[in-house]
Amino acid sequence: MCVQVVLAYGAESDKDLGIPGESLSGIYSAREFVWWYNGHPDYSCLKPDLKTSDSAVILGQGNVALDVARILLRPTTELASTDIATHALSALKESSIRKVYLIGRRGPVQAALTAKELREVLGIKNLHIRIKQTDLSVTPADEEEMKTSRARKRIYELLSKAAAAAKTSKADPDQRELHFVFFRQPDQFLESDERKGHVSGVNLQKTILESVGTGKQIAVGTGEFEDLNCSMVLKAIGYKSVPVNGLPFDHKKGVVPNVKGRVVSHTSGDISQTEPGLYVCGWLKRGPVGIIATNLYCAEETVGSISEDIEEGVWKSSKAGSKGLMQLLEKRKVKKVEFSGWEKIDAKEKQMGIERNKPREKLVTWEDLLAAAAN
Ligand code: NAP
């Protein structure tokens, strides 16, 4: 019999900056914030500080940074018809955050954004976009990057257009502001004098770009610093996968080492060291990059490897497969939810959503989820 196991548990931790003050309260990873507004049971009690000041800082300029900026800036009347968790919607209704600063250590040509996601944010009602004109000037190396990447050129054009449109629009006191701040890297977090242990801002170092060959430019500190005050910081600098005891893990790359989805024991990627029957897909296979479509292609590759191995009868197993797994879980008294239980949760959330005019109402405690699965 053939038994295959596919590791598909993604990236459930975060990269650290490793700078002073990172453990102050009021600093969250974007992942924690996303899990909070999406109703993850372990984060529904996060209570992010949305009421102390009018400013929030988001570190990083990728799509996750855009996602969290959108939640902070979109009118709550619009969020109400999405599947956002109710506790998050209530907190956002009371939020005093009016200014969101998206901080990038490189320039507008290097922002790790995609056009569709950027357009969505730029299109938020009653939102004033702020971009310094000087940050939009491009160097020959930037021109070169844009020549080789249409996507980068598109992002640069969208940002330039947004900056130009903002210059001609009238100021409205009710408007919220999204500041794209380029060429700044966080150096340390500042502690509030009034609230000990709480963040009151970020000290940023100005940067310039240096070419490192192959068309890439990296940010280098200039030794000039400035403070940016805020009461909340979201770190959106990338996710990180976590190892599982007994399974191969490449700590440097943060992935399970593999060749086309076949898990290998050593990080050298030597195919002869394949772990029989063990496969991997998604961010755990490639690292935390790529949109949903990227994951679809990635999964196809892994499924292709599984099919080839079955056809070629590469290995046989005496293990008991899913039946054996269920027996082991029973023996160890591990609580489990099978697919039929997941379907019941899905149906219940959708039903509750219909009653509230939204796509679904999330169940946000383990107790409620397990009760729905058992019904
Ligand atoms: P990301 O795209 O890798 O962006 C990370 C950002 O953090 C970059 O601006 C990066 O700057 C910056 N950064 C990294 N380390 C830093 C440091 N030490 N100091 C300062 N800045 C630092 O990661 P992500 O936003 O977490 O997104 C992960 C993947 O999910 C991406 O492929 C993204 O497109 C995808 N995603 C897609 C969607 C969607 O399609 N709707 C939504 C969310 C996420 P540098 O470029 O200088 O390294």
Image (cartoon, rainbow, N blue to C red):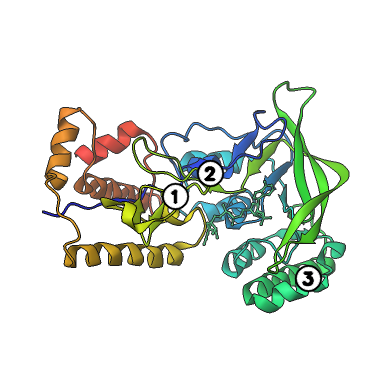
Secondary structure at badge 2 equals helix
* Amino acid type assigned to the residue bearing label 3 in the image: Ala
Q: Residue at x 24, y 67 (%)?
A: 308
User: Where in the image, quadrant-wise, is ligand 1 located?
Assistant: bottom right
Please say whether residue 357 is visible from this viewpoint.
no
Which residue does the numbered mark 2 point to in the structure image?
31
Asked where in the image residue 205 lies, by quadrant, the reply is top right
| 202 shown above or below 300 | above
Residue 228, percent from left and from top: 80, 41
Amino acid under label 2? Arg
Q: Nearer the viewer, residue 233 or 47?
A: 233
* Residue for badge 1: 267
Of callouts 1 and 2, the N-terminal one? 2
Q: x, y (%) of residue 326?
A: 16, 39
| Rendered residue at 62%/68% (across/down) | 119
- Is label 1 within 8 A of ligand 1 (CB to nearest ligand atom)? no
- Residue on which disc 3 sits: 141
Mark 3 to mark 1 CA distance (whole Å): 34 Å
Query: Is mark 2 in CB contact (under 8 Å) with mark 3?
Result: no
Q: Is 27 on the left or on the right of 328, as rendered?
A: right
Quadrant for the C terminus in the image? top left
Q: Residues within 10 Å of mark 1 (few under 14, many from 20)?
A: some
Residue depicted at 68% across the width and 68% down the height: 214
For the image, the number of numbered tags is: 3
